[in-house]
Amino acid sequence: MIIVHPLVVIGDRICRNPYYVAPEQYLSPDWPRHEANWMMTNLEKLQQSQDSLRVSQERYRSLSRRLLEQQEHERSALARELHDQLGQSLVAISLNLEAIEDELSPSSRARVPESTQIIRKMIEQVRTLAFELRPSILDEFGLVEALRDLVTRHGQRAGGRVSFTAAPTDARAPVEIGTACFRIVQEAQTNVARHARARHVEITLTAQDIALEVTVKDDGDGFDVEQLRTGLGLIGMSERAELVGGSVDIESVPGAGTTVRARFPLPSPQGVAGTDQ
Ligand SMILES: Nc1ncnc2c1ncn2[C@@H]1O[C@H](COP(=O)(O)OP(=O)(O)OP(=O)(O)O)[C@@H](O)[C@H]1O
Ligand SMILES: [Mg+2]
């Protein structure tokens, strides 16, 4: 038997006493009126707590949204600086080296190819860093091209077989959804490289009338989704998606790979075709 209310024993009577009030009060003739008042007061308090919880959640969401927007903005500025300043300066050094090569003594000239090689590597690193901070391709050519570029770069680094398909191939989404989608794929791919030991990764983007869906599926080690995780990546994915009205679902089986699926609502079919990414 399950007893859900505390009991009070008064003389030979056993009563239910859900409110923990003194027995005399509970048994007095005007208790029903008290009880009604008491319940009304508590319901009002409950309503007030729920209202203030809703307000706090709304504030938290709008703060998170602003923080993410600010972060994207700063990343964008940093990426531009890296590309335009550091990148261009390195190119200039490389050209200068080539220009003076013939004037150098034979022993100094022998060091030019190695130096040029180092500078080329630095230029490549600066470009990769700038791309990861904020791919200008996302703003200029949209989500599909940005994802294609991300997948290619990542595939080159990770070494596994990575495929990308988009349907339709010119799928577009509002800026904030495109950014969230891009960052989620970026984190999912990083996770594959760091944790999965996968041989094959499939990335798919599908846009229908009212929803955009992206999946990152690997055939790697998998993990137990229910177990407590310490990283911030998976939490960040869900938060990013939720802030633009979407959601992330992770399916993983130890030994049988992982699928990360993010879904975003699109404003309207016209909105999809006419927006920025
Ligand atoms: N594709 C995957 N294959 C196998 N395990 C994964 C995969 N993605 C995530 N995991 C597991 O889930 C854990 C949590 O991932 P999460 O991205 O949140 O954190 P992290 O990658 O460890 O650290 P970070 O905060 O830098 O992202 C990982 O440590 C890993 O054990
Ligand atoms: Mg991670």
Image (spheres, rainbow, N blue to C red):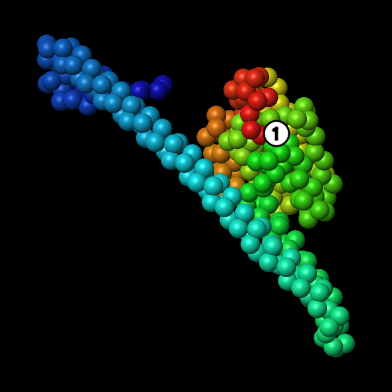
Whether residue 229 sits left or right of residue 214 in the image: it is left
Residue 141: percent from left, percent from top: 71, 39
Which quadrant does the C terminus fall into?
top right
Which residue is label 1 attached to? 214
Left or right for 36, reference 78 = left
Viewer can see residue 3: yes
| Percent coordinates x, y for residue 83 in the rendering | 66, 57
**Labels in figure, total:** 1
Quadrant of the frame with the N terminus: top left
Residue in the image at 67% along x and 47% along y:
135
In the image, 21 versus 43, the foreground residue is 43
Q: Residue at x 63, y 49 (%)?
A: 134
Q: Quadrant of residue 114?
A: bottom right
Taking the spot 80% from the left edge, 38% from the top edge, the residue there is 164
Under mark 1, the amino acid is Val
Determine which quarter of the picture holds residue 179: top right
Q: In this view, does 114 lie to the left or right of 141?
A: right
Task: Report the front residue among 61 and 137.
Answer: 137
